[in-house]
Amino acid sequence: MAKATMVSIPYLFLLAALVLNCQCHEKKVHVVYMGEHPKGEHYNYSSMHHSMLKDVLGSRSAAKESLVYSYGKSFNGFVAKLSDEEAARVEEMEGVVSVIPNTELKLHTTRSWDFTGLPTPSFGGAKGGDVIIGMLDSGIWPEAKSFDDEGFGPPPAKWKGTCQSADNFTCNNKVIGARFYNSRGEYDSSDFKSPRDSEGHGSHTASTAGGNVVKGASYYGLAAGEVRGGLPSARIAVYKVCWYGGRCNLADILAAFDDAIADGVDIISVSLGSEEPREYFKDPIAIGSFHAMRKGILTSNSAGNAGPFLRTVSNFSPWSLTVAASTIDRKFVSQVVLGNGQIFTGTAINNFVLNGTSYPLIWGGDAANVSAGAKPDFARFCLPGNLNSLKAEGKIVLCDGFWDGSGVLLANGIGVVMADIMDDYASSFPLPATLISIEDGIKALDYIRTTENPVATILVGETWKDVMAPLVVSFSSRGSNPITPDILKVNLCTAFRQQKDPRSVQYNIISGTSMSCPHATGAAAFLKAAHPTWSPAAIKSALMTTAYVMDPRKHEDKEFAYGSGHINPVKAVDPGLIFDADETDYVDFLCKQGYTTSTLRIVTGDSSVCNNTMPGKAWGLNYPSFALALEDGEQINATFTRTVTNVGSNAATYYSSMYMPGPLKVEVEPSILPFDAIGQKKTFTVKVSGPEITQQPILSGFIHWTSDDHHAVRTPLVVYTVFSSTLSPYSYSVPNKRSHFKGSSMYHKNGILAHH
Ligand SMILES: *[C@@H]1O[C@H](CO)[C@@H](O)[C@H](O)[C@H]1NC(C)=O
Ligand SMILES: *[C@@H]1O[C@H](CO)[C@@H](O)[C@H](O)[C@H]1NC(C)=O
Ligand SMILES: *[C@@H]1O[C@H](CO)[C@@H](O)[C@H](O)[C@H]1NC(C)=O
Ligand SMILES: *[C@@H]1O[C@H](CO)[C@@H](O)[C@H](O)[C@H]1NC(C)=O
Ligand SMILES: *[C@@H]1O[C@H](CO)[C@@H](O)[C@H](O)[C@H]1NC(C)=O
Ligand SMILES: *[C@@H]1O[C@H](CO)[C@@H](O)[C@H](O)[C@H]1NC(C)=O
């Protein structure tokens, strides 16, 4: 964004020269996605793809050179080297849904080996020897104790996969299959050209989801303790798509889905994603998980690590399970109270006592030491030497960006309030200090700008110990759904590390939502073992409606951060009611998203029709939550329809109750649902009304169904305004970790700080 405005005349010439010399004819790897197989015919896919390429490229030899890979086991498509112009021509060909450049996706993690060995939860003794978990990740270390096959019989009969043994890599009766994919064809010196894991990530996610119980083990030389997967009796099938540095290619991910679905896995776990939101049929994980869903396979994927910004969630298709990361750490907070009564909760270890006394509040940008050469747009970072002590003395200074507080201290300030990306770990400072969110920083600056004598105080720090409800960590990506605002994504959160041992508090490290995903995968595998016939939507519904409730006071982003709540697999085994959905529901959903009948026929390979040709809201999708996205100033008025299936006891009556915040008026009709048989379905509507709302980040309530046989089914309901990205301080290209003051903030015309 910033670049475009800064282009000067000589650069324009350079740019023109580049355009004339353009790389348009350079061939790049593209994925051509062609939907479901044509039914009932036995195709030679590679020959079909070959002939399509021949039509575009003009000759057999050119086609042969171009074709990299043919998909065809679980869906139709191929990978080919094409110029931009050729790619555009292929996209227009009959039967082609989308052409996607072979970009790189990233493992959803920032560190890997650090957290190995921390105990992971297990959900009891269900027999799961027949459940196969497909792991799309960086491979596996099959000799690890977690993957020992002692006590495991031969693979279940449904298994049709293979073990691509290379070098010394072998499978066993625990790790029953393994393949590797590298469409780039390049290897780093530390890569193994086999399914062996050089990163550590894949071994850890696999052991978290379905690893054996390993007692007293010093796992990979780190912390000792009991290590076990969510379903220790599960079998593991490995699809290595990520290589050195956590880099994973789109073409390889789709190839892995193509194989995994055909191999007969029950659950697919993917802890990686695109860095930007993609339309459903340009997103390899949405495509792969759609075809998996059609075969009854649930895909569990991580929400990504682009938090704490809203709408950063990747992997948001409604047919998959999206998991955020939470922490059960102690949290150090220190609050700022403004003269107008606004209170912002920040993180800091603050032992300074201001006794509630208010001090004048200024913004660092207004206190530049001009004689020392400091400009306001630099003084706002409050670095040592940049502040004018005559202006800062005895005051609390609001600064842009995280720093150590020394600049304010040297200018004789009383305290410092820093606005930056929030961290979950707190720092201590040499003066009263706290770190607040950028959003709160904007509010505080607004207060300074609009008030005659702005004042504030910083309260002494508190430790939020023993929090019953866990917290979603800041790096965990947030909803809402960037593509379909009416579908609430994130679905759930799970711990990204467990702490049985108090000493493990020291492991206060950032790992990533990728560690949450395998916890959910393990839970889903556990449910699959208990209910082999449940659909992906049923498993997802059970996990969502039974989740532990998170504390909304501790999460400004509420459901956007934690979804339905914290996963509770033991309760999910017996949810009472489920919100089921099958392919026709998702096709209807896609119709309302504006996909055409012809596209959907290719994707599904059948004669699907969009009965609703008008694009519309996604209110009808049978989803276990309710989200109403409104334009600014729009009136609250919507009706959702849902159908629940009784999976509890034969006879049970469910009564609805709800909690709704202030302006929301909600009617559930009917409010009582009697069931007299397992499998019986009942439909109800939820009518939401209220005044016009503006600038509403999220109104959050829930509907609860409780039965006379003690089941409880909770579904969140949120209403929010879709904020335009030009007004928003947030965007998708968020730095992965705090970048201190260096360019992490951008100076706006009106002095409002904003990230880019
Ligand atoms: C499919 O077609 C390709 C290229 O035309 C050919 O090399 C291959 O042998 C064929 N495969 C089968 C199973 O017929
Ligand atoms: C297999 O080969 C890798 C790479 O050379 C090596 O690090 C590993 O120890 C070997 N494993 C076994 C079981 O031989
Ligand atoms: C706060 O109160 C304590 C006890 O009354 C006093 O010792 C201390 O100096 C006060 N601190 C400030 C910053 O006013
Ligand atoms: C401004 O900076 C100069 C050079 O560091 C320093 O000597 C001076 O005291 C500062 N002025 C104020 C008012 O802080
Ligand atoms: C559209 O209508 C037809 C005929 O009524 C029905 O069979 C089909 O399932 C409907 N499709 C969807 C996506 O609802
Ligand atoms: C709410 O929406 C319904 C259906 O579109 C419409 O009939 C009704 O008049 C609306 N109510 C208000 C108060 O706008």
Image: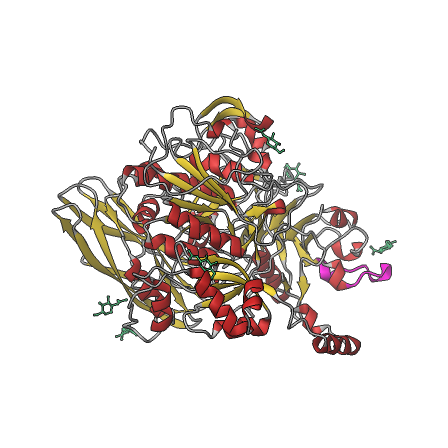
Q: Nearer the viewer, residue 20 or 580?
A: 20
Q: Whole-percent x and y of residue 337? A: 57, 51
Q: Quadrant of ligand 3?
A: top right
Residue 470 lies in what quarter of the image? top left
Task: Work out whether 556 lies above or below 111.
Answer: below
Q: Residue at x 31, y 31 (%)?
A: 127
Does the image show residue 254?
yes
Number of marks: 0
Task: Work out whether 203 lies above or below 303.
Answer: above
Task: Indicate how the structure is coloured in the image.
Answer: secondary structure
The stretch of residues the image draws in magenta is 364-375
Q: Nearer the viewer, residue 450 or 676?
A: 676
In the displayed structure image, the side of residue 610 where residue 493 appears, left or right: right
In the displayed structure image, the side of residue 621 where residue 412 appears, left or right: right
In the displayed structure image, the side of residue 444 where residue 541 appears, left or right: left
Q: Nearer the viewer, residue 204 or 437?
A: 204
Q: Residue at x 76, y 57 (%)?
A: 391
Which residue appears farthest toward the top when viewing the image?
216
Q: Whole-percent x and y of residue 717? A: 34, 56
Q: Residue at x 65, y 70 (%)?
A: 750
In the displayed structure image, the side of residue 332 where residue 150 appears, left or right: left
Q: Whole-percent x and y of residue 226? A: 47, 25
